Amino acid sequence: MSGLFGVVCRGDCSSSLFLGTDYHSHLGTQYGGLAVYSGDSIKKKIHDISRSQFKSKFFDDIQLMKGNSGIGVISNKYAQPLVFQSQLGSFAICTDGLIENEDELIAELISDGIFFNELSNGSTNATELVARLICQKDSIVEGIAYMFKKIEGSISLLLLNKEGVYAARDRHGHSSLVVGIGEDKCAVASESCSFPNLGLDSVKFLGPGEVVLLKSDSFESLKSNGELNRVCAFLWIYTGFPASSYEGKNVEFVRERCGMAIAEKDDVEADMVAGVPDSGTAHAVGYAMTSGIPYRRPLVKYTPGYGRSYIPPSQEIRDQVAFMKLIPSVDLIRDKRIVLCEDSIVRGTQLRNYTLKKLFDAGAKEVHVRPACPPLLFPCKFNISTRTRDELIARRAIKSLEGRDLEDISEYLDPSSEKYGKMVEWIREDIGATSLRYISVEDMVEAIGLPRNELCLYCWTGRFH
């Protein structure tokens, strides 16, 4: 998972690049990187941001990185952007996504005499692989199209050279890229929330597989989008920043609608509605608006500096972040019945060991958990999030109920089935909630407001097409 930001300005781009990239800090915790085209060369800086915020690491660097165009990235796995000298000229590149056939492609290129020298966490840097594939062709656009055809999975990218900033959205449209234009600049970003404070207006969401070239006051589409568009529904449910929009649908608004949909089919009696901050907050607001139960904040996030507990690569770090960032307000909690809205239940560890434990330890009488998406049953195929079935609490529930891991779990996908009910009850008991009810896929899709066939629902349904 990465956040991408690129900008071309009439004057110096360094301030816009620094601030625009920083607005993507919620999308990664491992590396931050900037590259600026300055004169006839590219200046690059990469820092480890696992123990400090992006802005503190790059504040001094950006004063020395002057130029009219640049790209930035907040990355959860790979050190980037990377700079290359090739038959296509000098360029810097940063990427977002997942290449499932990475090992096969690396072996194929090595057999052709191409070597790799960028390592991240002991493995080949996927951004270098993308660059090597692009360089197999005679132009940037042809190379990107070739890369799209070769990889299995999804890759979106920004590429900086003397011509400007190329932006390419993955061919499935799983992730999002949006172009913004201001009085003296043109930018592209993963998150549209990076635009308003920089004087930019969103003007175009790139289509799947589309490639554009940004200039200082305009952009040109160099490769049209494909027919297949499957944007990740989890962008609205959890990943995206509340002020962002994807495909014209605002994140905060969608989350409120999810909460409303849950409340419309719920009959629990409670004293308050609360959200697990930050991403559960809007879901809880929507639930409270429809149910009439007051919205309150029994759990308060101490500082955004702790980051998102879903993102860090190790369970130990995820657990530490989850424990430290939420502080209970005991006087609000004692003897209260609470509806707790959460964006999702992925592994269940944090909800069980930290969130619910804190509420009950503070004297909560009941805690009714209401996730804003259905049970996650399939690891993501298109980005770095959940990687194995065993990570998913719903899969552990099925394995416990069946005594083995099943390939065909179709009965567990039907909310009206007996097996689905047993799975939900197993999860409820495991996390220690008073009650547990999930939203349906249909209600979640309706809350997002796009046709079902334009959304990737793979992690809930196991189907992409």
Image: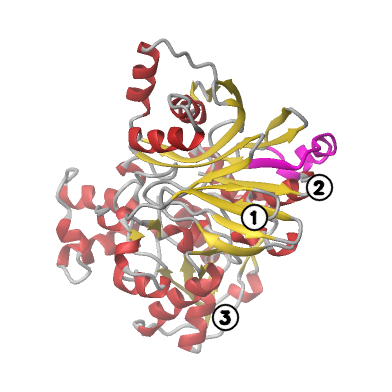
Q: Quadrant of residue 429?
A: bottom left
Of badges 3 and 2, nearer the viewer stands 2
How packed mark 3 is, by other alpha carbons closer than 10 Å (few <14, some 14-19, many 20 or more), is: many
Q: Nearer the viewer, residue 166 or 306?
A: 166
Of badges 1 and 3, nearer the viewer stands 1
Is 33 left or right of 353, judged from the image as shown?
Answer: right
Q: CA distance from mark 1 to mark 2?
A: 14 Å
58 part of magenta stretch: yes
Q: CA distance from mark 3 to mark 2?
A: 47 Å
Q: Quadrant of residue 418?
A: bottom left
Residue behind mark 3: 295
102 part of magenta stretch: no
Q: Earlier in the sequence, mark 1 or mark 3?
A: 1
Label of residue 11 in the image = 2
How packed mark 2 is, by other alpha carbons closer than 10 Å (few <14, some 14-19, many 20 or more), is: few
Residue behind mark 1: 218
Tag 1: amino acid: Ser
Q: Coloured how? A: secondary structure
Q: Secondary structure at mark 3?
A: loop
